[in-house]
């Protein structure tokens, strides 16, 4: 891994999980090259979060960390498709 790639991950709530959007891009590119572009279905992708008491619906809907997570992974999948 290059130092650029290493700097693009964040620690998830669990100490052994990381948020690594470029990892899905690399995996999809590898599968496409190795197996001559098979159909691929990503059936589950998500992030863990520390337990917290959310006091209001507004707080729950303002989930910028999860929105950023999905934006990063969707962008990485889009890069793999190109």
Image: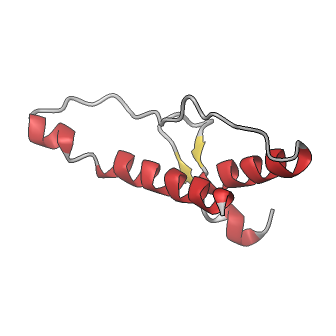
Please provide percent x and percent y for residue 5: 70, 65
Please report the residue visible at 53 percent of the width from the left and 35 percent of the height from the top.
45
**Quarter containing the N terminus:** bottom right
**Residue 76's image quarter?**
bottom right
**Residue 35's image quarter?**
top right
Q: Nearer the viewer, residue 21 or 78?
A: 78
**Quarter containing the C terminus:** bottom right
Q: Is residue 2 left or right of residue 63?
A: right
Please provide percent x and percent y for residue 66: 37, 45
Please report the residue visible at 57 percent of the width from the left and 58 percent of the height from the top.
78
Please provide percent x and percent y for residue 3: 74, 70
Q: Is residue 20 left or right of residue 54?
A: right
Q: Nearer the viewer, residue 60 or 7?
A: 60
Q: Is residue 40 left or right of residue 42?
A: right
Please report the residue visible at 69 percent of the width from the left and 62 percent of the height from the top.
6
Tell me, what colour scheme is on the image? secondary structure
Please report the residue visible at 35 percent of the width from the left and 50 percent of the height from the top.
67
């Amino acid at each position: 891994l290059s130092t650029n790639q290493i700097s693009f991950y964040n620690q998830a709530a669990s100490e052994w999980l990381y948020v690594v959007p470029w990892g899905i891009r690399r995996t999809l590119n590898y599968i496409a090259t190795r197996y001559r572009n098979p159909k691929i279905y990503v059936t589950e992708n998500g992030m863990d979060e520390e337990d917290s008491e959310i006091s209001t619906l507004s707080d729950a809907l303002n989930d910028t960390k999860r929105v950023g997570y999905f934006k990063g992974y969707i962008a990485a999948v889009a890069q793999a498709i190109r």
